[in-house]
Image (tube, rainbow, N blue to C red):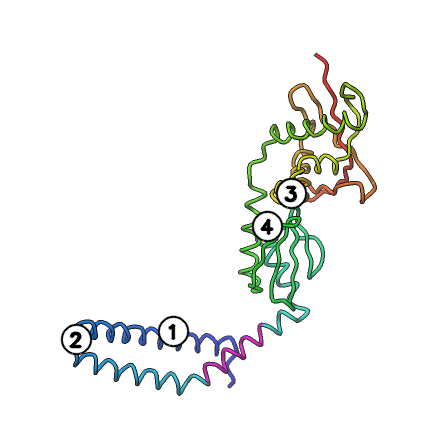
């Protein structure tokens, strides 16, 4: 009976582990005896080492063939139609809310892209990206969920965020209305606000637009957005090119294009 490929690979790895473990012990004995000028032990251990290496050499072609066959089987699976479903199930099982289809997925503020030709999987947030060469669903999902959870579980300082939005809003308000005083309630483009918040190139790299959008989504989940004497209103838009797509923690979508800040009386 022909053994399953994965069983053959397991047996091969187990045999190689045992062989390298023995070789390691013998080599340590060789070095120790040489340091002590223990000529008899050195001679004996070198003979054992030679025998072990000869055994490994005799078996190496079989070991290499088994490992190569396992490698080719895994590569064929990654290139098959069954692989995307396996990956999606692994990612969803660790709480990553995937959207899209293989080879490109989104789960704000991230994008996950597979490139089988280059042998990498990229996890991007705006222009920032990192990559892994691990295509195994379990290992890949653990890596992705670690990065994702680090962002979504980070503390959201709504007070600081509102303060920054207010500052950018005031700057753009005076520039667009062209008055000496701020016209409260005037709508300002959120994309323009983002550009003001990230005037420096380094700031844009540290705070990419997808993360800004994600912060807006977290802010919008509040029933009413207040800061100090101001009320914030994220206004909807139906024009994709002029708006930002917000996805809240429940997966609900909304498009916002402008921000209006109202000065409360009293």
Among the two numbered marks 2 and 1 on one chain, the one whose residue lies closer to the N terminus: 1
- The numbered dot on residue 37 is 2
Q: How much space separates mark 2 and mark 4, taking CA atoms?
A: 60 Å
Whether tag 2 and tag 1 are in contact, CB under 8 A, the answer is no
Residue 182 in the figure: left or right of residue 162: right
Disc 3: CA contacts within 10 A as few (<14), some (14-19) or many (>=20)? few
Among the two numbered marks 4 and 3 on one chain, the one whose residue lies closer to the N terminus: 4
Among the two numbered marks 2 and 4 on one chain, the one whose residue lies closer to the N terminus: 2
- The numbered dot on residue 95 is 4
Closest to the camera, between mark 4 and mark 3, is 3
Closest to the camera, between mark 1 and mark 4, is 1
Among the two numbered marks 1 and 4 on one chain, the one whose residue lies closer to the N terminus: 1
Q: Which residue is mark 1?
A: 17
Image vertical order of residue 12 relative to residue 213, above or below? below
How would you classify the magenta stretch by its main secondary structure?
helix
Q: Which residue is mark 3?
A: 201
Query: Circle 4 sits in a helix, a strand or a loop, which is it?
Result: loop
Whether tag 4 and tag 3 are in contact, CB under 8 A, the answer is no
Which portion, as a residue range, is magenta? 62-74
Q: How much space separates mark 4 and mark 3, taking CA atoms?
A: 33 Å
Query: Circle 3 sits in a helix, a strand or a loop, which is it?
Result: helix
Image vertical order of residue 161 relative to residue 81, above or below? above
């Amino acid at each position: 009976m022909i053994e399953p490929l994965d069983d053959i690979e397991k047996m091969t790895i187990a045999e190689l582990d045992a062989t390298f473990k023995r070789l390691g012990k013998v080599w340590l004995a060789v070095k120790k005896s040489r340091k002590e000028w223990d000529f008899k032990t050195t001679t004996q251990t070198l003979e054992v080492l030679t025998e072990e290496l000869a055994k490994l050499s005799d078996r190496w072609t079989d070991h290499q063939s088994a490992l190569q066959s396992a490698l080719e089987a895994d590569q064929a699976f990654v290139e098959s139609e069954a692989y995307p479903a396996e990956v999606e199930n692994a990612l969803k099982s660790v709480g990553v809310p995937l959207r899209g289809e293989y080879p490109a997925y989104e789960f704000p503020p991230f994008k996950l892209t597979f490139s089988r030709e280059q042998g990498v999987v990229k996890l991007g947030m705006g222009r920032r990206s990192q990559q892994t060469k691990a295509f195994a669903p379990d290992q890949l999902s653990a890596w992705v969920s670690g990065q994702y959870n680090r962002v979504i579980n980070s503390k959201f300082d709504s007070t600081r965020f509102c303060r920054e939005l207010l500052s950018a809003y005031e700057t753009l308000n005076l520039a667009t209305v062209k008055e000496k005083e701020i016209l409260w309630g005037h709508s300002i483009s959120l994309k323009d606000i983002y550009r003001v918040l990230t005037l420096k190139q380094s700031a844009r790299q540290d705070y990419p637009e997808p993360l800004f959008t994600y912060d807006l989504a977290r802010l919008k989940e509040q029933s009413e957005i207040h800061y100090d004497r101001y009320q914030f209103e994220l206004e909807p838009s139906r024009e994709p090119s002029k708006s930002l797509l917000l996805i809240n923690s429940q997966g609900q979508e909304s498009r916002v294009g402008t921000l209006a800040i109202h000065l409360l009386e009293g």
